[in-house]
Image (cartoon, coloured by chain):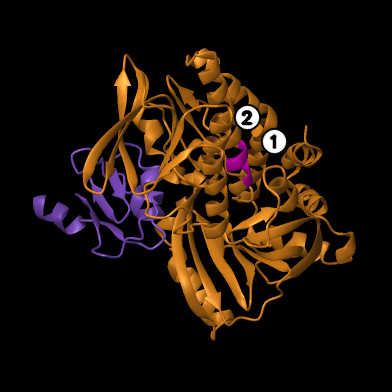
Amino acid sequence: MTDYDVIVVGGGPAGSMAAEAAAKQGAKTILLEKDRDIGYPVRCGEGVGATGLRKFIEPDPGWIATTISKVRMRSPDNTQVNFGMDDAGYVLHRRLFDYALANRASQAGAEIQTRAYVDGLILEDEYVRGVKYQYMGETRKLTANIVIAADGVESRVGRMAGLRTASKLKDMDSGYQATVGNIDVDQEMIDFYVGDNWAPGGYLWIFPKGDGMANIGLGINGIYGKDHNPHDMIHAFLRQYFPTASVLTSVCGGIPLGKTLKKITAKGIMLTGDAAHMVNPVTGGGIITGMEGGQIAGDVAGQCIQAGDYSEQAMKAYPERWHKAEGKNHEALYRIAQGIAEITDDQLNKIAHRLVKTPSENLSLLKIFTAVAREKPKMLLDVTRAFAGF
Amino acid sequence: MMILVKDNRCDFCGTCVGVCPVDAIELREADISIIHDTCIDCDICIWVCPIDVLSSDAKEEVKHD
């Protein structure tokens, strides 16, 4: 007899979705979060698409900071390309959003334990049979039939089970974000800067958070981290463009932009969310894909529990369903991201000069990517694939 | 050579842990340590750190040469 059917490690969106889905299948589930709080610190730009979000939860004004309808992209020479969004977007209050998801998991019957730092696995015959964790200076053990690792960018739990989860340096963005007050930005627009000056191998974002506040963040490719650091760059950016802004919160974090891990299950364990490298490799967005991965993982774990079959064979439904839902699209996006990484500042300027002639009401993200693909023809098929969804 | 954490400046974001190829970094809520016996001094954690709190003890290395 095990203590639990399912142990979920990590209380972000992926972990909470996994815990909720497993509990809904009747599995006795506990979620362990290493920090004191669910949802804090917020290491995230907090932007999501409305359609993706609605698949999992009805938008609630309690955790939506702003509703986005416009995008601006600035090329390295500051040519501004403005366009509307086909789908609305939101900037979230992740602290409250993560709470709502964890609360939903708890209402589905999952237990939640904060301050629980998992630092080992219970292994028997190469099977993961539970976890060891630290709680308030005390070492505790819990057994379970399935462990779901949703432990974020660190992805250590998977490593403990022998899975190779480390990101290559070129697949990891080094990120820093300041949430600032006293700035005057369009509260319905997200604003991006690309190019070597402000964002080598990545982009700088301004996401409005309402009441004259915004998330101003930067992700640079890990390779460029040798000579740059995003903390200094964001502060230089603020001095230049928003000298009167006050920094209310600042956080740093890594954004794993690699392909989803080849193996997201092993004996007795599933990996999901950032820990499984499910982040969109082009946008760096990981909330929706993490929720999707987490929900599938939890659902499959629950089914395994019901069937009394915890074999890797029984868990195969998880990678299969993930691949069907997001996997192919994710791989096309990864190739697009590799293509974008090769585009020079001159090419970016040329693309922007061409796009800026198109009236903004006629521009869409697809048109922009098609223009990018004119510079990098090998991207065209993947762009078509990603947008057509095949 | 040894990877060092500059005192009291770490934000505990875990980016270094995510790239470490040998799992040589321990990170808890507000505590980070390098497992020096495991570390292979590849230095990528230093490069990826968003706020440059990791450094390699190059002086030590020179001393031992």
Element type where label 2 sits in the image:
helix
Element type where label 1 sits in the image:
helix
**Rendered view: A245 above or below A305:** below
Name which residue type carries label 2.
Answer: Trp
Name which residue type carries label 1.
Answer: Asn
Q: Position of residue A280 (x, y in %)?
A: 62, 44
Q: Magenta segment, principal secondary structure?
A: helix
Q: Position of residue B26 (x, y in %)?
A: 28, 45
Density class for disc 1 (Cα within 10 Å; few <14, some 14-19, many ≥20) is: many
Q: Which chain is purple?
A: B
Q: Position of residue A34 (x, y in %)?
A: 37, 47
Q: Colour of chain A?
A: orange
Direction from residue A299 to residue A190 in the image, left or right:
right
* Chain under disc 1: A
How far apart are the two marked residues, 1 and 2, measured between alpha carbons? 11 Å
Residue at x-position 38% and y-position 63% = B51
Give the labeled residue for mark 1.
Answer: A329
Q: Position of residue A239 (x, y in %)?
A: 51, 81
Q: Earlier in the sequence, mark 1 or mark 2?
A: 2
* Chain under disc 2: A
**Rendered view: A309 above or below A223:** above
Magenta range is: A288-292
Query: Residue pushed farthest bottom?
Result: A244
Direction from residue A301 to residue B47 in the image, left or right:
left
The nearer-to-camera label among 1 and 2 is 2
Residue at x-position 23% and y-position 64% = B7
Q: Quadrant of residue A281?
A: top right
| Residue A74 in sight | no
In the rendering, which numbered label is found on residue A322? Answer: 2
Residue at x-position 77% and y-position 66% = A81
Q: Quadrant of residue A267?
A: top left
